[in-house]
Image (tube, rainbow, N blue to C red):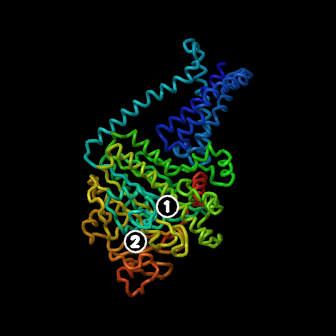
Amino acid sequence: SRRAEISAGLWLSALYFMLWLELHMPEMSGLGLRKIILILGPCLLVLVIFLLWLGGIILERFQNLKNEMMLSALLTFPIWLLVFRQGIGHQLFKMESAFGHAIFFALTIASALIVGWLLSFMSSIRIFSLSRLWLILVLPTAFFALFGPIQSQIQQKKTRLTAEKNLPDLILISVDTLRQDHIGVYSANAFHTPNFDNLAQDSIIFENAISPSNWTLPAIASWLTGKYPHQHQSGKLLWSISSNLPSFTPMDPKIPTLAQELKKKGYYTVAFLDNAWLKGLGVPQGFDYYFLYFPPQLGKNLMGLKLVKAFYYLFTRGFQDQGASWLTNQAIRWLKKNQNRKPIFLWVHYYDPHLPYRAHQKELPAEKANPVVAKFSQRLYPELIRAGYYNLSQANKQLIHQLYIGEVIYTDHHFGRLLQELKNQNRYLDSVIIFTSDHGEEFWEHGSFEHGHTFFQELIKVPLLVKLPQNRNAGQRVSAPVSTIQIYSTFLKFAELSSDAPPDLLKVMNDPSQSPEILLSEATLYFDLKGAGIDRNLKKIILGPASEKTAFDLTVDPLEKNPLPLEQIPPALLNLDIPAPSLGIGSDSLSSEMRKNLEALGYLK
């Protein structure tokens, strides 16, 4: 019947809209195209027939257009609700309040009514009455057929504007929580990381790279601004009295970011990121396109885990093979669609080595049934470990460390896929590629666990590889200490832009005296440590609460087991003063969506 066709048309239009989002704006859609095809594809014809039959029976009971349209809207509503749940309402319309939600739902119902009315009106016209079903199937298909070439022409026009610039592609690849000594090129005891090591063979290897912070937000903000945390003030803890929830200060919009500066030279800036905190940091500032991955909630709690196990073949592979796999797929898809776009600034940030660790079957087949591993895979809060809530044996600690190693190996595999795609597109050789991490991870080397709480080397000494065009200076090792805030000035150098940030990394490579006199690491997440300073001779001081100071000579004591007498520390380092982070009171708290994502990632409980 005509009424059933209208209902099916509304349902299919919503599905087409979701497919369009996935194809053209994947950062707006949380439902993967592959899952849409696999789950809905085989059932689509049967489902449409069922809707036609069911709609015909139900709608024949309604005698006027008003009731018909209301029921059509109700049939369409669950699909649009799913779209909204995946983040469309938050990210597309910037509506975070309850009032904003109400507006969105009202617009959704109104749009469904309008579409239904148009279909009803058109099907009453003689020319359309011969074959009404084509309205459902042909019009959306025609839209996709026309939109693709139009979008392609727009992209080609933009590409022609930027292709005249003889500038290299700039690529930043970062891995959250990656320890330097867990990469083969840095340690003979490291585990098998062939793809990280392959990049190192073509790169300059900085052996003493220091992160400006021991946790994510301040460190990444420093990469993007070329400033230390006490200068950019990003990631400072706020607390909402009304909701008793934490939040953090975003990047100051007045401070130009790396992406904004590169756009001045015609760079197309794109980011693929896997960390829920980065949305609140203001990372999209300056990016033409960004994809922020939120992990699925299913499997993050006991009930979800039972559902996953119950439907193993349908769900387990999809939910276990997320993170690096998903992020790499999105980056590769974008690269394939934009092969002629140059120059680009591409940033890919992997998250997998961060808590909560997952037991990847290929990397850790023997431990997957261990109860400690199973519990840790679901949720094990580091603050409870530090407080002594879990009485972990040495064997259990080793198993936890093995889970982390599995995540590193897993990330290395998908990192290799990304590098191969760059090579397939002939981007790799002429690009500047910088590989690094925001911080490391402690596994009880100094009596504690995780990150954000101390400034020992296992947390702030990070990998730093710089691959130059034509692989110049490949394999050269630089022992002079550097900071990852120098990533900013290094990229600007290749974009032929000047900067007042600390000198670029190549200057230090050519002249170690260009290394900053003292490198800082600061802005701790937990406790009240002020930070740490390291001078050019690898003397180090950690500033604790009040006036407490601890010093080390990293040249003879790289594991920081034997503190130095303070009188052996140079005056400039001994008198170092780092502004202590302050706890602010914020008027804004986390949205419920953000809180759920952070709980899924293990940040909150």
- Residue underneath mark 2: 520
In the rendered structure, which amino acid carries the disc numbered 1? Thr
Residue at the limit of the structure toward the right, as seen here: 61
Mark 1 and mark 2 lie on one chain; the one further toward the N terminus is 1
Specify the label residue 309 is tagged with. Answer: none
**Quadrant of the frame with the C terminus:** bottom right
Residue 461 location in percent, x, y? 42, 68
Residue depicted at x 29% and y 40%: 161
Residue 91 to residue 463: above or below = above
* Nearer to the camera, 561 or 140: 561
Classify residue 5 as left or right of residue 506: right
Front disc: 1 or 2:
2
Disc 1 element: loop
Residue 284 location in percent, x, y? 44, 51
Residue 218 visible in this rendered orientation of the protein:
no
- Residue underneath mark 1: 249
Residue at the limit of the structure toward the front, as seen here: 366
Residue 545 to residue 68: above or below = below
Residue 467 to residue 454: above or below = above
